[in-house]
Image: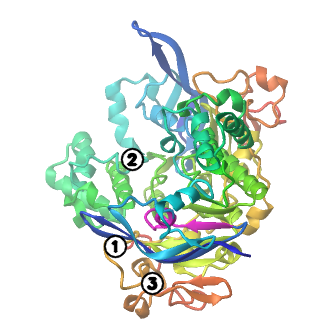
Amino acid sequence: MHNGDVLLHVEELKMHFPIMRGVIRRQVGAVKAVDGVTFDIGRGETFGLVGESGCGKSTTGRVILQLYRPTSGKVNFDGLELTEMKGEAVRRLRPRMQMIFQDPYASLNPRLTVGQLISEPLEIHLGMSSKQRTDRARELLELVGLNPKFDRRYPHEFSGGQRQRIGVARALALNPEFIICDEPISALDVSVQAQVVNLLEDLQEKLELTYLFIAHDLSMVRHISTRVAVMYLGKLMEMAAREVLYENPLHPYTQALLSAVPVPDPVVEAKRERIILEGDVPSPASPPPGCVFNTRCPLAEEICRQVIPEYRQVRPGHFVACHLVEA
Amino acid sequence: MPRVLEVNDLVTRFYTPEGVVHAVNGVSFHLEEGETLGIVGESGCGKSVSVLSILRLIPEPPGRVERGEAFFMGKNLLTIPKSELRLIRGSQIAMIFQDPMTSLNPVMTIGKQVMEPIIEHLGMTETQGRNRVIELLGMVGIPQASERFEDFPHQFSGGMRQRVMIAMALSCNPKILIADEPTTALDVTIQAQIIDLVKELKDKMGMSVIWITHDLGIIAGLANRVMVMYAGYAVERAEVGPVYADPRHPYTLGLLGSLPRVDGRHARRLVNIDGRPPDLLQEPTTCPFAPRCNYVIEACWESNPALREIEPDHEIACWVDVRSASPTRMVAAHAQR
């Protein structure tokens, strides 16, 4: 559990994207990308958000930063209610909350030098002079383990891992407190992933950062997080402290998900029991009634097909949305 | 165990405007009957190009298989006439690929596509073929197979498309199934389904499997033997047990140390492998891993070590014994790059 000093509080957050049809663009439905998500992130912790593709984990990150305005719900950042703020007020808060994106090839403008890329936010938000910006950009490059003399180079001259470092440097430019890392390593080669994760850990310690780490790689999330939440079809299934969630998962989905992850150890693999889930994830435009996981759940009962389970605390700091878990 | 495939000294290069890419540099391996061989490595290490070369599926130009032999049932696949190769490819040696969407024809029904190799290789009639397709689709776990015969690829999910690919690959009872990162584009629960399916079908049909992946985790639970590749070379080769319990090449050692584990049994800090994979435009005269290696010694800069047996059935391409040597360079968190 975090120490009670909450930096971010998300409550009943919903993001429904309308589906429009016909010539008059009538709304015929909605993709419920995020459908009632509640959690806190404590200052200085790394909160892991995991789930399979399309579960709404990235959308959750974007809604927190108000890159999408949510359909309903609350996002409270250090006492400030972001959902009630106007665009300009949110913009003024941007220096405090930043994002690192998945694809280091697509998220850097190829026409700007690395120095320009990193110092762009310094000009926009702090109005620094050109000399100040150059100095700060070099300082940041050094901080993320790149040669400061590389500031005149262009993104294409760097490898994937180096580009991700540039993305990190840019996110750090304004001294943020909170960084959303949206699949920051999934586009990188295995041997380079560890470099970036080690860097994120070092920076967290040095700069007292708080991370929301969004990823589908359950092994890496276990490594880096203090607490972890598991998402499925727009809803949280389970949330607990890292060790608790991985050693004693209560939700059938978490159990299946963890059992499906291969372990690089033939001795362990030979003994492991795998829970193989049947079928595919249903469409978030027409989620099943009752528990969203009931169509694939090996334990589903009648109640699961009819009643949406409440997301509730079953042990201190351990939340589960499942009818079958006893409090 | 008799060998179903034996590959010797394979060399494949690509002649690009930027220069000659040395993709595969003298790789040898074999596949025993009924076993699963895992080929592991990062992008650009030559793992896919190696198997594509054997099946002569390298686009030529720019690619060219310069050297080597690949014996399948006494025939060298690299020299037999194309017509003969065509009888083997897709029937006795079948392949599944990473991206099932681009490997399927979007304007042809699923049924027709799975039926193609059956009619081509087994000479069945339309009706026989149709029945066989429905049987195959059922076997790979596609529900209501007969109703889905007329469906198109876009009506299937990613996992279901990979099942269709597997059905197609297995349609002629192949001796060898080559799986090239077939689960990389899939979610982890779907990946588990596909791995489970291939394991089950392998035993049922008595195939041998070559599984290519960057994921050391998958190989641990799936393969009998492993070949680790780096920069177009095989750098370590052994049975799965020894490779994971006692990796002897510094690259394998680093790779295993850089992986966190879902069961939490890993070091608090991940091993950094500094730098990045080498540029393949130059044929290395040194060990290709030397610039990133924590155990590098003088000899590594003088010549590129060949694979040598250090224990029965355990080979490495390295001058150093990592068990007795101590790291020559400290693992710095942020080395100058």
Q: How many marks?
A: 3
Residue A297 locus on image (x, y percent): 76, 35
Residue wearing tag 1:
B336
Instruction: Report helix, strand or loop for mark 3.
Output: loop
Instruction: Give the Cα distance between marks 1 and 3.
Output: 13 Å
Q: Residue B253, can we see it? A: no
Residue occupying the point 46% across, 12% down: A21
Identify the mark at residue A176; answer none if there is no mark: 2
On whether residue A306 falls in the magenta region, the answer is no
Q: Nearer the viewer, residue B197 or A218?
A: B197
N-terminal of the two: label 1 or label 3? 3
Instruction: Report helix, strand or loop for mark 2.
Output: loop
Read off the chain for label 3. B
**Amino acid tagged 2:** Pro
Residue occupying the point 67% across, 61% down: B175
Residue wearing tag 3:
B329
Mark 2 packing: few (<14 Cα in 10 Å), some, or many (20+)? Answer: some
**Amino acid tagged 1:** Gln
Instruction: Report helix, strand or loop for mark 1.
Output: loop
Instruction: Give the Cα distance between marks 1 and 2.
Output: 26 Å
* Quarter of the image where one finds residue A84: top left
Read off the chain for label 1. B
**Amino acid tagged 3:** Arg
Magenta segment: B36-54
Q: Please tell me whether residue A90 is drawn above or below residue B83 in the rendered image.
A: above
Q: Nearer the viewer, residue A299 or A249?
A: A299
Read off the chain for label 2. A
Q: Are marks 2 and 3 in contact (CB under 8 Å)?
A: no
